[in-house]
Amino acid sequence: MSGHSKWSTIKRQKGAADIKRGQVFTKLANAITIAAREGGGGDPASNFKLRLAIDQARAANMPKENIQRAIDRGIGKAGVGRLEAVTYEGYGPGKVALLVEATTDNKNRTTAEVKNVIERGGGSFATPGSVSWMFGEEGMIVVPKEGKTFEEIFEISAEAGAEDIVDSGEQVEVYTKPQTLESVKKLLVEKGINPQSAEVVKKPVTTVGLTDRETAQKIFSLLEKLEGLDDVARVWSNFDIPDELLSQIKA
């Protein structure tokens, strides 16, 4: 399984216990603000990206007033600094591709921080377009098994219109086209399956295999440090790691 899925699974298993709650809320609020600004306004009924961002915020128990404040900022009601979405590209140890999505009110500061973390982690900063072509945009719905077998969820998801279905342990990852994410999620709910999350992700179309523990550990450390930056929203990577090697890595 690709590192895209492995890294997502590891983060879900770790939970948010070791992440500052305030930082989580800041990242979620920034995502809502950008979605309100770039996705078509502050009404989640007509703005799909905003709907997804709000769902993620609610799943993290973000207060309703925080959500509304982030929406207001996105549509220009709040008198605060303007945020912009920025994507950075680079390579980590072992020539693993990195795609870093950030939201910032100071692009120079964020660029310097991301570049510094990548280079200190044994990687290199790359020019726009050098890495992004290695990823395709897809919808991803995470479904907890909760007593159901993978085969049962697979059958229901396939009938709902899923493009790909992956067993990742205690959860099943259901992949869709971005434009059908909402309809597939709705059909799953109608069939008695309650998704844990639903979002548009960057899935690698080519992967780099990791074969030694040292390189794998460096990659995981770099991903954690990048996601620890306040301005970084999400990090995508294209490494592929076998389960036996994954079990040797310190999360």
Image: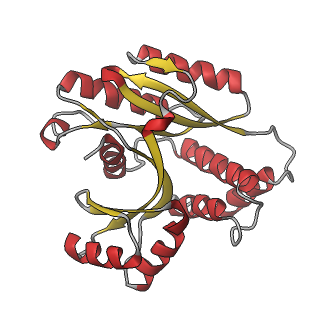
Nearest to the observer: residue 58 or residue 113: 113
Q: Is 93 rendered above or below residue 165?
A: above
Residue 27 pos. (x, y %): 59, 44
Looking at the picture, does residue 242 appear above or below residue 201?
above
Model colouring: secondary structure
Query: Would residue 149 be visible to someone looking at this image?
Result: no
Q: 120 or 19: which is nearer to us?
A: 120
Judge by depth and name the residue closer to the eye, 5 or 202. 202
Can you see residue 97? yes
> Is 205 situated left or right of 212 in this image?
right
Q: How many tags in the picture?
A: 0
In the rendered image, which quarter is residue 243 located in? top left
Residue positioned 22% across, 22% down in the render? 214
- Between 78 and 96, the one lying in front of the other is 96
Q: Is residue 19 above or below residue 223?
A: below
Quadrant in which the C terminus is drawn:
top left
Residue furthest to the left in view is 244
Identify the residue at image location x=46%, y=47%: 136
Picture coordinates of residue 216, whole percent (x, y)? 25, 28
What residue sits 73% from the left and 51% below the top?
38
Q: x%, y% of residue 138?
A: 46, 55
Quarter occupied by residue 54: bottom right
The residue shown at (51%, 21%) is: 126
